[in-house]
Image (spheres, coloured by chain):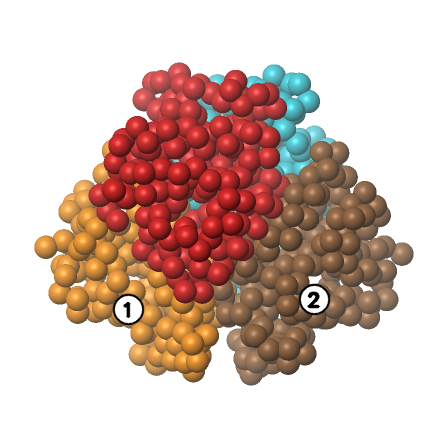
Chain colours: A red, B cyan, C orange, D brown
Amino acid sequence: MKKIAVIYHSGYGHTAFFANKVAEGAVATKKVEVEVLTVEQATARMDTLSQFDGMIWGSPTYMGNVSGPFKTFMDASGSVWMKQGWSGKWAAGFTVSGSPSGDKQSTLISLTVLAAQHGMFWMPLMMTNETYAGVKPDDAVNRLGSSLGAMAQAGQVAPEVAFAPGDLKTATLFGAKFAEIVATKS
Amino acid sequence: MKKIAVIYHSGYGHTAFFANKVAEGAVATKKVEVEVLTVEQATARMDTLSQFDGMIWGSPTYMGNVSGPFKTFMDASGSVWMKQGWSGKWAAGFTVSGSPSGDKQSTLISLTVLAAQHGMFWMPLMMTNETYAGVKPDDAVNRLGSSLGAMAQAGQVAPEVAFAPGDLKTATLFGAKFAEIVATKS
Amino acid sequence: MKKIAVIYHSGYGHTAFFANKVAEGAVATKKVEVEVLTVEQATARMDTLSQFDGMIWGSPTYMGNVSGPFKTFMDASGSVWMKQGWSGKWAAGFTVSGSPSGDKQSTLISLTVLAAQHGMFWMPLMMTNETYAGVKPDDAVNRLGSSLGAMAQAGQVAPEVAFAPGDLKTATLFGAKFAEIVATKS
Amino acid sequence: MKKIAVIYHSGYGHTAFFANKVAEGAVATKKVEVEVLTVEQATARMDTLSQFDGMIWGSPTYMGNVSGPFKTFMDASGSVWMKQGWSGKWAAGFTVSGSPSGDKQSTLISLTVLAAQHGMFWMPLMMTNETYAGVKPDDAVNRLGSSLGAMAQAGQVAPEVAFAPGDLKTATLFGAKFAEIVATKS
């Protein structure tokens, strides 16, 4: 069975919450084994991450880009980059911030470039904004209209009540889609 | 008196409507002369655009970037680029699309890079998301949380009723701010 | 047999020359059928492009991004976007400009975002800069150090003599790699 | 007299060397006071950085973006962001990596977005590639063809011998230009 990792940084618990929703979606497919790792955990076992056939990376958007801890993980992956140890594996990404748009796209661009540096294939979001199909904005899959990866908006309340239902639906569908792609195209 | 131009492309009238709101904000300051030009008009008088001390560029976001007609205007500006005829002038930008986020940031990045190619100074949005200050989302200035320039969301209805009040407030404040900067820092 | 298309715009023949080198690399693998199309040809048969299992897109970098004609093709693909007709297919990209760096990366970012809008998987360059392995810069594969796609530099001389040998080697290897990926992972 | 800071991170001394060349160019104008700070020094006195009328930010490009330490500084500046304490000040940026292109542009985009988040004006490179004017590539100002900021290439040798003369000329001219802009347009 193929294996995937959801690797994330979370400053206040919101991105962790979202990461677990993504992982739930992947687990539910029963098509891949799923591990959820913080960037610290992932960095500690950098040499063993090549066991995964795919990685979904998640970071809050801080000051218009991935967070410092997530970037530190990216830099640590430079040791793998030198031998292109993740080449031909799959990657995808998500980000969370407080505003609907909020420079989340530049975070996703950074994750896309990271995948490219590693020679990894990039799976984009693969879902259009369901609002256009008449679903109520809060409930709509990809209600923010992202393309490179999953975007979610979370205010300064507890993670359990911070997300619109549409964003959480997006998370599980995204995890499920990634699982399916890795299972069939690795 | 300093002069600015608002140069835009609009496929269905929404970006034109927003461009005029931006221009209204600039005009109201009485600090600069303002002209509103379509990209076709601007291209036709490319050689005379250097009379402007600043330009605000606006494009809908189509397929994740400036529209084809706007890009065609960008290419036409290559004749000015060769002699760096706009170097040291001011630039700013805005974009409109149907989703809250909707890859609008990559459009603004393209406009920022265009300004840089021309050696122009970039004025960003300079407004934080008023939602954080307790304003109702629809009424909030910069409710989408942009930074490089102004973002607006418009659905497939007539321009007059397509925009949230917050987005239109953002437009006039943005135009006014640009006028003030060009008037004092050119 | 899987089919791929190399779709490009070329203002002065350099990007056309490079596109054909990419296609040669793909053809030589005998793993896919290859067609080379200008953006005008591709736009004229937009409805039939979904027959291809993968597309390699190429554009010169003009004013820091894809050319106007290439962007016009991108916009035209919006008709396919609405039904997500290219979802799950493969995409990759390349760009050519006169300087070693020359804002070519923002062109590749635009192509990556286009793929994401269409729900297509992105194959990055998958080659490290051979200069680091001791190859003479001009002869080195990926001598410019790109990651999202292939970059080439061409001066204002005839296409046949405009490219460094390393850039042309990169082109054929890139085409071959894409053919292999599409043949095995579609 | 206006004050500027050159704030940088350097992993192996190359970006530090380049940062000092930028500072030399600024000092030589005698139009501004110049301080050179590491990101650690700058973070330690974050509350006092608003005394500067402009900041030039420099980071190596690691894995396609600013380095982890530089991103950590960016995150720390979030405390200033909340009160928009740097709004209306000037910013500019540079980056160093081993390849001619090497995803340096995405690093500069990150710095541009940082400036925009802070409401700062962005001064781009403002120099065209002198190679086009017939200067020998190694000696040419902006030989790599950047626009958003200064790019330099440095191999794995001592900083003193790592840079092409053109890149160092670019550094001093860039610092001088920034000094002049801050002195006259703050």
Location of residue B81 in the rendering, given as x and y in whole percent from the top left corner: 55, 62
The structure residue drawn at horizontal position 60% and vertical position 61%, both measured from the top left corner, is D60
- Asked whether the viewer can see residue B18, the reply is no
Residue farthest to the right?
D1
* Same subunit: marks 2 and 1: no
Number of disc labels: 2
The structure residue drawn at horizontal position 62% and vertical position 73%, both measured from the top left corner, is D167
Figure quadrant of residue A62 = top right
Task: Check the image and report above or below for D27 versus A103.
Answer: below
Q: Do the numbered discs 2 and 1 sit on residues whose CB atoms are within 8 Å?
A: no
Task: Check the image and report above or below for D141 versus D61.
Answer: below
Q: Which mark is residue C173?
A: 1
Q: Look at label 1 and name its amino acid.
A: Leu
- Which quadrant of the rendered structure holds the N terminus of chain D? bottom right
Q: Is D130 left, or right, of A50 in this rendering?
A: right
Figure quadrant of residue D28 = bottom right
Location of residue A36 in the rendering, given as x and y in whole percent from the top left corner: 43, 37
Q: Look at label 2 and name its amino acid.
A: Ala
- Mark 2 lies on a secondary structure that is helix
The structure residue drawn at horizontal position 38% and vertical position 80%, both measured from the top left corner, is C139
Q: Which of marks 2 and 1 is in front?
A: 2
Q: Is D115 left, or right, of B184 in this rendering?
A: left
Q: Name the residue under label 2.
A: D16
Residue B115 or residue D121, whichever sits in front:
D121
